[in-house]
Amino acid sequence: MDKIGQIEIRVTGNVGNMELTPDNYDIREIISMLENAENLLYPINKKDRPTISYSIENGSVRHIFKTSIQYIIGFNAIIGQVHQMQSVDFLDISTAKAFESLQEMTEKHDYKFSIKTSLDNSNEIVIDRNSTFKRSESVWGDAEFYFYGKVTNAGGKDKANIHIYTDELGTATFSVY
């Protein structure tokens, strides 16, 4: 049986004049946290991931996610690197979006998130109004490409695309916007 480790995401803040607790923490925020946690732990290939168990505890609001220690060790390295670089640009898109989602929640609700693992000497990252965990703008360039081949399919009412069979690439699909 796999050894189990955990990730703790602690949320502090206020709801109106009351301190944040599991009793006044909205279910939409819990759903968002569950989705973010899955994206943080398993950005790719979610079908084959191990089980993630969940509990919510007092101490403001403490989200506890338990899963295989192997993934906890990897995630500990990720939060260490994010903390060191103060950037999410190097992460997979779904992991970066999860960090951005937490950053947006801090701005919307004035929450503070503290993320750490159950490992000894765990890395810890704090996301609050002063942090800036957002991806940099992508830089686009103009380019022209020429594909020589045979058009095998073209059309589509809502999502038009063209299929071209080339000797070098096989069938290439191009979306038309």
Image (spheres, grey):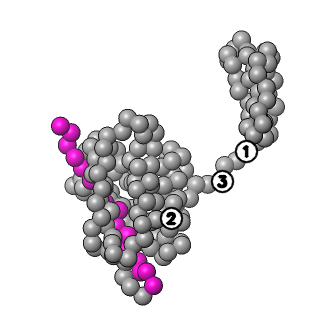
User: What is the three-letter code of the residue carrying label 3?
Assistant: Glu
Sort mark 1 into few (<14), some (14-19) or many (20+) by Cα contacts within 10 Å: few
For this rendering, which residue is in front, 135 or 163? 163
Please state if 28 lies on the left or on the right of 12 as rendered: right
User: What is the three-letter code of the residue carrying label 2?
Assistant: Gln
For the stretch drawn in magenta, the main secondary structure is strand
Residue that badge 3 annotates: 137
Image point (21%, 39%), residue name:
2
User: What is the three-letter code of the residue carrying label 1?
Assistant: Trp
Q: Measured from the top left, where is residue 140 in percent x and y?
A: 73, 45
Image point (67%, 16%), residue name:
170
Residue that badge 1 annotates: 140
Magenta-highlighted residues: 1-16
Q: Which mark is residue 103?
A: 2
Q: Measured from the top left, where is residue 87 in percent x and y?
A: 51, 56
| Residue at the limit of the structure toward the bottom, as seen here | 17
| Residue at the limit of the structure toward the front, as seen here | 157
| Residue at the limit of the structure toward the left, as seen here | 1
Q: Is residue 159 magenta?
A: no
| Dot placed on the residue nearer the N-terminal end, 3 or 2 | 2
